[in-house]
Structure formats: structure tokens, C-alpha cells
Image: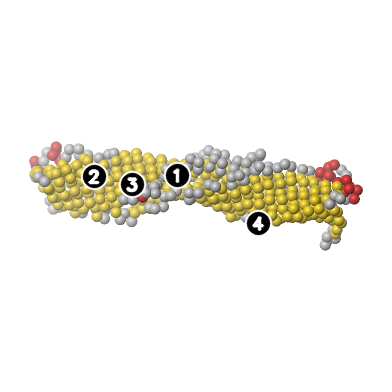
Amino acid sequence: MKITLKIALVIGLAILSGSTGFAQKKVKMKQADKLFGGINKEGERFDRFVGDVIFEQNETTIYSDSVHFYSKRNYMEAFGHVKITEGDSVVITAKKLIYEGDKKEAKLRENVVFVKKGRVTLYTDFLDYYRNQQEARYYNGGRLVDSTNVLTSKKGYYQVNTNMASFKSDVVGKNPDYTLMSDTLQYNTKTNIVYFRAPTELTDVEGNVFNYEEGQYDTKIKKSDLNIGQIETRSYFLEGDNLFLDDLRKYYRAVGNVEMISKEQDIIITGDRSFYQKDKGIAKVFGRALMKKIMEQDTMYLTADTLVAIESDDPSKKRLLAYNNVKIFKSDLQGRADSLAYVTADSIIYFYNDPVLWSSGNQMTADSINVEIANNSIDKLNMSVNSFVISKDSISNFNQIKGRTMVAHFNKGNIQKVDVNGNGESLFYALDETESYLVGLNKIICSYMLIKFKENKADNISFYIKPEASFIPPHEIREPQKKLKDFNWREEEKPVKQEMLESTILAQQKPQQTIEKAPRQTFDETGILKPDNNDNE
């Protein structure tokens, strides 16, 4: 026959209290198959209940196979098929339990399963549950599971009333879309938002890696708002003061002190803002954008309003685009244009819309220009339509070459020769040996000509296909003869490295966050993050 509450009252009032107020604090036996008396090693008396044991305290009910109950201390030890229910929301099962009724603290051991119905399940072998604080803690490894995520760590908290879980040490989170690893993070099981409290690495199913330091990630809508972090794309690392990630749209945005680093080439791009469209493989950097390409004993600097990196599995389709107010500086090449394309597979830079370049004292213009890079230096410069090369001599005369197309060949950054194809014209001022006095002006018209350079100055000219040449003595040179048609000396537009860098100094003020953050948390003496959130269910 089971021992009921009425029989227990007859057996002894030591187990129960007669006053209503006291009864609310005491743990009460409701049911058991058998009752035995006993004394422990310290000589303390206890009651032993065996078989379908049920105890209660307020809204908490404790089930087990057997219980040792110490009435004076309001203390119990439960064994075998332990289960605690708290109202309709919390169910905990384990093999062993120690429960202190006055403190309302439960220590559950072995195969512990903590369930908040409709919200989360926590698995561990070592759980302490503090009823007054509505807080469950584990210390030697645990796994929290909900409909969206599985998170494991060595230590952790879960607060029932706020739905906030905190994880510490060897944190690993998994869901169908990604795996994350961290030392410390928090997770709200109601909102499904992850809060990053320490450097965290997230790898999605496509192998893209995201590194976070601070911020939050909504696992439902796959959006995040981060203070400091890094995105790793197929070709680049992207970071900034604030990152905004939208995994559903495959759209990622960085704001403030943006830096994009190429994995494959020595290229660094900085700017004020950036976004990355993963499905299209396109990354853009806006606002005082600067590209630095590290070359052998040199660096190429490029500034523009916007820089665009295009990824592709086909190497020939990978490229870097720059447009609006493009400027380029390298020790052996400076230039500007409205837009530019750098094809990384061929190491060719294409300049469009009123391009002008300067190299080795020569100004080069054409409707379009492309520069071939080899061994981290200029190898060839191709000019198409209305090609024009101008250089200034030691007494400020302008030597000029004009043609339909031109190809300038370089060696170790120095111009070696120029091929002129179609409608070739040239003006070269002849100087004496001291290069101090004008001897005369050579004017040549020819469909094709080859100009060879020595120490970056024209040294020898070869003419082909019906050349027309004339030499004009100094006293016969008239002003209109000094310049070919469409002559335009643009030296004042020549980029200066320091001015380029100064114009791209990034704003120091970080933009405001657009998503409300969880409050800053603290750690207790055990090293576990203590949650403090008012997001009550």
C-alpha cells in the first residue's frame, strides 16, 4: 500500500509543519510505496522513502525511485528516475538529485535533461538549478538544443524567465546553415539571436568564413549587426567597424574603416563603406576608396570613388574595377582616368574615358590605354585612337609623337621604344651637346615609325612608308609650328602619392548601431558569463 499524505501525517509531524506559512517552505512528501527510518554516518536521522516517491514544494514536484529526507534541514537526496516539474514549463530528469528546500536549490547528476517546453532542451551530466533565480548552470560540458541551433560548451547558464543562455569555453554552435566556434557567446532561445562576446568564427555550408568580435546574429532571418568582424569570401577577407550580414539575400555590408585583402594577390583595398553579394561574387568599396598592390620593391596606389572586385571560378573573368575620379601612382607610372579595369589573370590595367599617364618623363594620352604588367613592373603600354606622347626637354621644349595607335615598350620601368601605327607625326627639338641651346626642330610625318629611347629620351627614329621630314632652324620656328594638333600638356593633373593618401584618410567616428544590443555582461568567479536580459516571455 502506498503511503499517502494523510498516513504521513499520522506517522509523524516531524516531516510536515502545521502552519501554512511554514508549509510553503518545507518540502512535503505526497506519495511513496514504503517508508523506513535511518541514521547516517554523522548520526543524523533521516526518513527513507522507496517506490513511486513524490515530493512537492509550492509549484515544484519531485519524482524518484527513492528519497532520503532530512526533515530538520529540509534537505533531500533522490535516486533513480529523478524528475522535477515546475509548473507547466520546466521538466528536468536525471539519475541523482540533492535538493535544499530552504534555498530552493537542486543539484542534478548523470544523464541530466533540462527542458523548457516549446523552447529549449539542455543535456549535461552536472546541472545546478536555482529556483529562486530561475537559473540552470552546468560546469563540465553541456549541449543546448532548440528548433534552430545546437550549442555546446564546457560551462554555461540558462535563465528560464529571460530565455537567455550563456556559454563559456570551447563553444561550438551548429545548424543546417553554419558552424560557429567561440570562447564566449550568448543565445536568446525566444528571439533566436546569438550575441557575440568574444572572437567567434562562423563557417557556412559553402565554406565561407566570417570572423566576429562583437555584435549579434539573428538565426531566424539570418541577419546580423556586428561591431568589428571579418568576412572571408572566395577571394577576399573583408572587415570593418560594423558588419551587417543577410544570409538569406546573400548580401553583406561593412561600414567604417573597411579593409578588403586579396587572398591570391598582394592587394589591399580600404574605404568608408562596402558590400558583398555572395551569389554574384561582387564586392564593392565606396567612399575614399584606396587600393594598394604590393609589388617587388614598390607599391602601386589607386584611388577612386568606387572599387569593385569581381570573383569567378574562371580566372579570366576575375577583375578589379574602379570608376569616377580614378588616380594611380607607382614610382614608374602615374595616371588618371574616369574608369579602370584590372584583369588579374593577364595582369593588364585598362584605362577608359580621357585617360592620361605619365612615365619616365613622358605624358601619354589616347581614347583608351592599357598597361601590361610583368614581373611587377610595366612591360608594355598600348594606346588606341588619338594616341599622343609628350615630353619636356631640358630647356622646356615639348617633344611630341602622335598617331592612331602606339605601343610603348618598357624595361625595368624605363621606356625603351615606341611603335607608331597610322597617321604618325612627330616633333623633336634638337639641342646641342650641352642640352642648353636649341639647334632646330625636326618634324616628321609618316604612317609608321619606330622611336628608340635612351635614358628615357628619344635617341633614334626610324621611318617607314613614305616619310615626310623637315628640319626648321631656330630662327624660322613660328609658334604654330611648336605644337601638333590636339596638344595638351596636363602636368598639373599628375597624381601625387601623399595627396592621394591624405584624401583617403578614413573617418574615425563609428556609425551608430541599427539593431538593439543585449546589455554588456559580467563573469562570475567560475568564469561563466552571467546573463542579464529583460526579454521575458
Q: Which residue is mark 1?
A: 278
User: Disc 2 vs disc 1: which is toward the camera?
Assistant: 1
Rendered-image quadrant of the C terminus: top right
Q: Which residue is mark 2?
A: 383
Residue visible at 25% across and 40% down in the picture: 367
Task: Judge by depth and name the residue closer to the eye, 344 or 467.
Answer: 344
Q: CA distance from mark 4 to mark 2?
A: 70 Å
Q: Earlier in the sequence, mark 4 or mark 2?
A: 4
Q: CA distance from mark 1 to mark 4?
A: 39 Å
Q: Which residue is mark 4?
A: 140
**26 above or below 486?**
below
Instruction: Where is residue 377? Give x, y as percent.
Output: 29, 53
Please tell me whether mark 4 sits on a helix, a strand or a loop.
loop
Q: CA distance from mark 3 to mark 2?
A: 16 Å
Please tell me whether mark 3 sits on a helix, a strand or a loop.
strand
Q: Which residue is mark 3?
A: 342
Q: CA distance from mark 2 to mark 1?
A: 35 Å
Left or right of 499 in this view: 399: left
Query: Label 2 is placed on what type of residue?
Result: Met
Q: Are marks 1 and 4 in contact (CB under 8 Å)?
A: no
Give the residue at the far bottom of this rendering: 41
Question: What is the number of the mark on residue 429?
Answer: none
Q: CA distance from mark 3 to mark 4?
A: 54 Å
Query: Label 3 is placed on what type of residue?
Result: Tyr
Q: Earlier in the sequence, mark 1 or mark 4?
A: 4
Q: Are marks 3 and 4 in contact (CB under 8 Å)?
A: no
